């Protein structure tokens, strides 16, 4: 068995995905969970791009112990200094610096000659050499670059001090055999490659990201760059959970291990989905609602006779325990805290006390509280969005002979705004009233309700997309009352709009 490194980029490439912005606290909480999951490297962000990004990287570097903490920089001193200032408190620091190497990027984006690109890359790595424990270099759009040119630039940056060479399939263009050949060519033709680890970073535009990553590993890459739930630019990055379970389930074939604690996968995925208010598709491998459910009679019969007829891995192996009734209205704080810990969720005292309040009110309405309810409660406490707007109360009158009318009171920066509005239905009346109270005009694009826990008083989760000034923002809210869940979801989308406005600035444009 060979060990490979898992480099998680959920908080950097992942957060660049439209609608995936996170608050500083959310990034920090998620980084703590990544450390519990067992990733080797956390790419915490792109510090030069905004004060918000810088602060999130600083907080993570200072407090998250275990994984190496990386920060992204273009191959320029200003970016490298920002990474250094942001992550210098980490146990082990890594600079991830990049410059584009494909003909199309060099000519049209950078407007540089290949010689200038090599010169800039070497200058950046040399400048950073004594500032970081590790330096990773990425030739951006690597897989559409000329191989001879790659050999040249890779050899030069290794000489200058880079110890990890990451090959990005930036536009998700490559096929598995091709990328395998690419990696083995680099391994065989760069004279000093034994002084560096080869890494792979695949985007999923043609649905090949995980297959490409596996092929690169087969051909000598020893670090995989992945993100939870596969979030990232456009169609996303290779999904961490899919790669890890492919390696685990087919250990016989790959002969590769990781440090990931697979039992943390499901919770980590749920936590991210709650934080970024983006539902997990039902059919998503490993973490989707249907990933382990067997519907057809033939499949159910097979499963009952012998699980392995239709199951290549158990739900328990990825942390999806069979749902059991654990707590009820008479359970105390002690029992609740104990179960939260057993589920592998780490909450601060303040978060436990907030979660316990939510639990009590749920247990009042719902006799049986399941593990999935607790996961949901914990996720919502951890995922509490930035509170530009909070819902104080709402009231709706409706009937088959009345125009639905809603009154809402919203706190905007601690000042209460009360408004009433009508709509085609109760939900639209609430949304119109929220628009008036916040002064933000949203246009509802998508609206879904799901029962996410079991029992008659199940928690309903509303997920929606709202377009504001031409950009789409997702929102999620849960409650046993669908109208309340709808109001919460809409306000969470407005909060994400405010967060994106605050978090604006450079992404990784070069
Ligand atoms: O996809 C890409 O090229 C990147 C680089 C910054 C590594 O994310
Ligand atoms: Zn990328």
Image: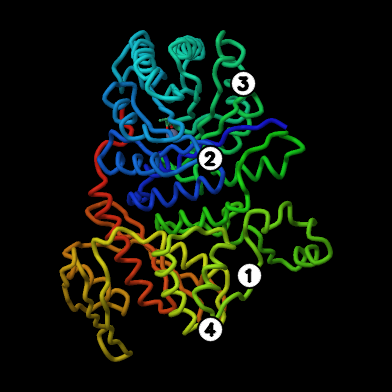
- Say if mark 3 contacts mark 2, CB within 8 Å: no
Residue that carries the numbered disc 3 in the rendered image: 181
Q: Where does the C terminus fall, quadrant-wise? A: top left
Residue at position x 33%, y 51% in the image:
23
Residue at position x 62%, y 12% in the image:
188
Q: Is residue 241 left or right of residue 134?
A: right
Q: What x and y, as percent, mark residue 330?
A: 53, 83
Mark 3 vs 4, N-terminal side: 3
The tally of labels here is 4
Mark 3 vs 2, N-terminal side: 3
Mark-to-mark CA distance, 3 and 4: 62 Å
Residue in front for this viewpoint, 53 or 327: 327
Q: How crowded is the residue under tag 4: few (<14 C-alpha within 10 Å), some, or many (20+)?
A: few
Could you say whether the residue bearing mark 2 is in a helix, strand or loop? loop
Residue that carries the numbered disc 2 in the rendered image: 238
Could you say whether the residue bearing mark 4 is in a helix, strand or loop? loop
Of labels 3 and 1, the one closer to you:
1
Q: What x and y, as percent, mark residue 311?
A: 74, 56
Q: What x and y, as percent, mark residue 99?
A: 37, 22
Of labels 2 and 4, the one closer to you:
4
Residue that carries the numbered disc 4 in the rendered image: 330
- Disc 2 C-beta below 8 A from ligand 2: no
Mark 3 vs 1, N-terminal side: 3
Q: Where does the N terminus fall, quadrant-wise? A: top right
Of labels 3 and 2, the one closer to you:
2
Q: How crowded is the residue under tag 2: few (<14 C-alpha within 10 Å), some, or many (20+)?
A: many
């Amino acid at each position: 068995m060979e060990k490979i490194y898992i480099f998680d980029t959920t908080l950097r490439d992942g957060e660049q995905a439209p609608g995936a912005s996170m608050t500083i606290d959310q990034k920090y909480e998620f980084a703590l969970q990544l450390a519990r999951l067992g990733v080797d490297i956390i790419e915490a962000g792109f510090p030069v791009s905004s004060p918000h990004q810088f602060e999130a990287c600083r907080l993570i570097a200072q407090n998250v112990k275990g994984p190496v903490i990386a920060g992204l920089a273009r191959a320029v001193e200003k970016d490298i200094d920002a990474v250094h200032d942001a992550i210098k408190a980490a146990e082990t620091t890594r600079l991830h610096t990049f410059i584009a190497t494909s003909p199309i990027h060099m000519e049209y984006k950078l407007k540089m000659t290949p010689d200038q690109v090599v010169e800039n890359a070497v200058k950046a790595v040399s400048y950073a050499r004594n500032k970081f424990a590790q330096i990773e270099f990425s030739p951006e759009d690597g897989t559409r670059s000329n191989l001879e040119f790659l050999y040249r630039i890779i050899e030069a940056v290794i000489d200058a001090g880079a110890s990890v060479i990451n090959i990005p399939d930036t536009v998700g263009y490559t096929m598995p055999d091709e990328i395998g050949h690419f990696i083995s060519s680099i391994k065989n033709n760069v004279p000093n490659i034994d002084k560096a680890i080869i890494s792979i970073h695949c985007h999923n535009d043609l649905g090949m990201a995980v297959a490409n990553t596996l092929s690169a590993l087969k051909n000598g890459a020893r670090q995989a760059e992945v993100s939870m739930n596969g979030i990232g630019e456009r169609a996303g990055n290779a999904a961490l959970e899919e790669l890890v379970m492919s390696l685990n389930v087919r250990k016989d074939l790959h002969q590769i291990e990781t440090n990931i604690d697979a039992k943390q996968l499901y919770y980590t995925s749920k936590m991210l989905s709650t934080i970024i208010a983006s539902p997990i598709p039902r059919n998503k491998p490993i973490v989707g609602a249907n990933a382990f459910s067997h519907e057809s009679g033939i499949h159910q019969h097979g499963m009952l006779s012998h699980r392995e007829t239709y199951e290549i891995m158990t739900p328990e192996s990825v942390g999806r325990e069979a749902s059991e009734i654990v707590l009820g209205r008479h359970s105390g704080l002690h029992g609740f805290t104990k179960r939260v810990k057993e589920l592998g969720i780490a909450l601060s005292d303040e978060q436990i006390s907030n979660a316990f309040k939510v639990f009590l009110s749920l247990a009042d309405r719902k006799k049986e509280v399941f593990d999935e309810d607790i996961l949901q409660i914990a996720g919502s406490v951890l995922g509490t969005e930035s509170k530009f707007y909070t819902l104080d109360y709402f009231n709706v009158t409706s009937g088959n002979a009345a125009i639905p009318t809603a009154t809402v009171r919203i706190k905007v920066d601690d000042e209460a705004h009360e408004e009433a509005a009508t709509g085609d239905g109760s939900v639209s009346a609430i949304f119109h009233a929220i628009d008036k109270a916040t002064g933000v005009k949203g246009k509802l694009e998508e609206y879904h309700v799901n029962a996410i826990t079991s029992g008659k008083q199940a928690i309903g989760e509303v997920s929606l997309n709202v377009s504001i000034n031409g950009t789409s923002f997702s929102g999620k809210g849960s409650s046993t009352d669908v109208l309340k869940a709808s109001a919460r979801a809409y306000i969470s989308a407005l909060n994400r709009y405010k967060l994106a406005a605050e978090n604006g600035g450079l992404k990784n444009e070069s």
